[in-house]
């Protein structure tokens, strides 16, 4: 794999030699290229990429370490550049609402957020249809698309090709039946079987006038305004959202928060040298405790050295155990 670097207009300059690349997808969405101090060839504000892959980005920082005689280029990945764009409601509207095929929606956002000089959406029909979907208010483009697509069990893909970042939608793949034991995966497990089951949502207003909403979750994971666990089985927690705009928004955000708090088991997994995507689901057996773990990939770390094949490490999101 050749790491190609460009000028500010994405015209190829050359192939970088003698480097190490750390590339992250899912949370920070950034990268660092480490090379010799005598190898200062990439212009600030330019781009790098591996053709026909999702690995590339814009160079925006440069650190020099004279003691180690090393340069450190940094910046945002193509996913990170989407994080820098905010989806705002139209004037006078509460939410930005979309309809239609996922690829068409992405195309509309590229136009709306003035990204078309670098990004292009697939012209094919994705097969994932949305009706009156509401993006969270003032969410960034990457997070907004990931959240929208997840409701249809789909994921966002980028491929750099012909000097453009091609965006498309693919189904999330469930690899949980393709199990890996803990002699291949690395596990860190901390069990907690008593997460909050009663969330007191505090909205706008002061003292007795403050907006208060009580939300409860039952044993099946359903959230309602009807108490389920009581007495010693109740685990309550408050949620402060003082700048909420409406009752509907407090209910929506509070429900999401309570579901998020159900992460009863703190589990981290690393799986090396097998390529998967953020959003895909993996599974494995921990041989000491006998736990079976299933979880979506939330973070993908790619390391490439001197044009060799990439090495992959993953971290997971909310896991299920059995």
Image: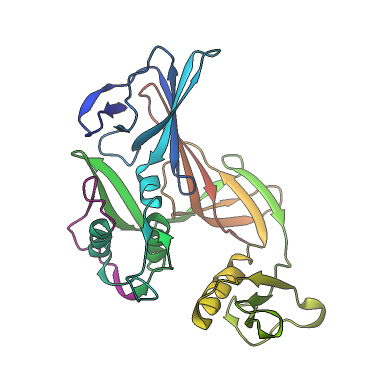
Report x, y in % for residue 77. Answer: 38, 41
Residue 151: quarter of image:
bottom left
Compared with 281, 65 (above or below) is above
The residue range painted magenta reads: 113-132
**Within the magenta stretch, is there residue 114?**
yes
Compared with 212, 178 (above or below) is above
Quadrant of image for the N terminus: top left
Report x, y in % for residue 237. Answer: 71, 71
Q: Which residue is at a point 41% across and 21% down the rendered structure image?
A: 19
Quadrant of image for the C terminus: bottom right
Is 63 on the left or on the right of 291, as rendered?
Answer: left
Residue 35 seen anywhere in this rendered image of the structure: yes
Q: Which residue is at a point 26% across and 64% down the rendered structure image?
A: 105
- 105 and 92: which one is in front? 92
Residue 303 seen anywhere in this rendered image of the structure: no
Q: Which residue is at a point 25% across and 66% down the rendered structure image?
A: 127
Work out which residue is located at the far bottom of the displayed protein and give it.
226
Question: How was the colour assigned to the protein in this rendering?
Answer: rainbow
Report x, y in % for residue 296. Answer: 50, 56
Residue 78: quarter of image:
top left
- 117 and 189: which one is in front? 117
Q: Which residue is at a point 38% across and 21% down the rendered structure image?
A: 306
* Number of marks: 0
**Within the magenta stretch, is there residue 300?**
no
Principal secondary structure, stretch drawn in magenta? loop
Compared with 34, 267 (above or below) is below
Is 201 on the left or on the right of 277, as rendered?
Answer: right
Residue 187: quarter of image:
top right
Compared with 225, 199 (above or below) is above
Report x, y in % for residue 260. Answer: 59, 65
């Amino acid at each position: 794999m050749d790491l190609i670097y460009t000028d500010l207009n994405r015209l190829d300059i050359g192939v970088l030699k003698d480097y190490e690349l750390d590339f992250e997808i899912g949370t920070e969405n950034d990268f660092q290229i480490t090379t010799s101090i005598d190898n200062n060839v990439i212009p600030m504000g330019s781009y790098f990429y591996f053709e026909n892959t999702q690995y590339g980005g814009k160079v925006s920082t440069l650190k020099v370490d004279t003691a180690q005689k090393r340069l450190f280029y940094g910046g945002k990945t193509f996913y990170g550049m989407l994080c820098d764009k905010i989806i705002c409601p139209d004037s006078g509207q509460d939410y930005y609402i979309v309809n239609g095929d996922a690829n068409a929606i992405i195309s509309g956002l590229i136009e709306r957020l003035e990204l078309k000089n670098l990004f292009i959406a697939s012209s094919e029909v994705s097969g994932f249809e949305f009706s009156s979907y509401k993006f969270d208010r003032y969410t960034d483009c990457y997070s907004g698309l990931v959240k929208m697509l997840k409701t249809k069990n789909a994921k966002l893909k980028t491929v750099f090709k012909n000097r453009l970042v091609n965006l498309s939608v693919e189904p999330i793949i469930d690899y949980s039946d393709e199990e890996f034991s803990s002699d291949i995966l690395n596990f860190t497990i901390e069990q907690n079987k008593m997460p909050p089951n009663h969330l007191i949502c505090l909205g706008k207003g002061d003292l007795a006038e403050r907006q208060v909403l009580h939300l409860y979750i039952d044993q099946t994971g359903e959230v309602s305004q009807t108490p389920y666990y009581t007495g010693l089985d109740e685990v309550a927690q408050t949620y402060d959202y003082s700048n909420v705009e409406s009752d509907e928004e407090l209910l929506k955000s509070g429900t999401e928060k309570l579901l998020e708090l159900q992460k009863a088991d703190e589990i981290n997994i690393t799986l090396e040298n097998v390529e998967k995507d953020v959003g895909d689901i993996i599974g494995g057996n921990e041989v000491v405790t006998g736990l079976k773990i299933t979880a979506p990939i939330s973070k993908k770390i790619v390391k490439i050295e001197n044009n060799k094949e990439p090495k992959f490490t993953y971290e997971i999101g909310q896991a299920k155990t059995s």
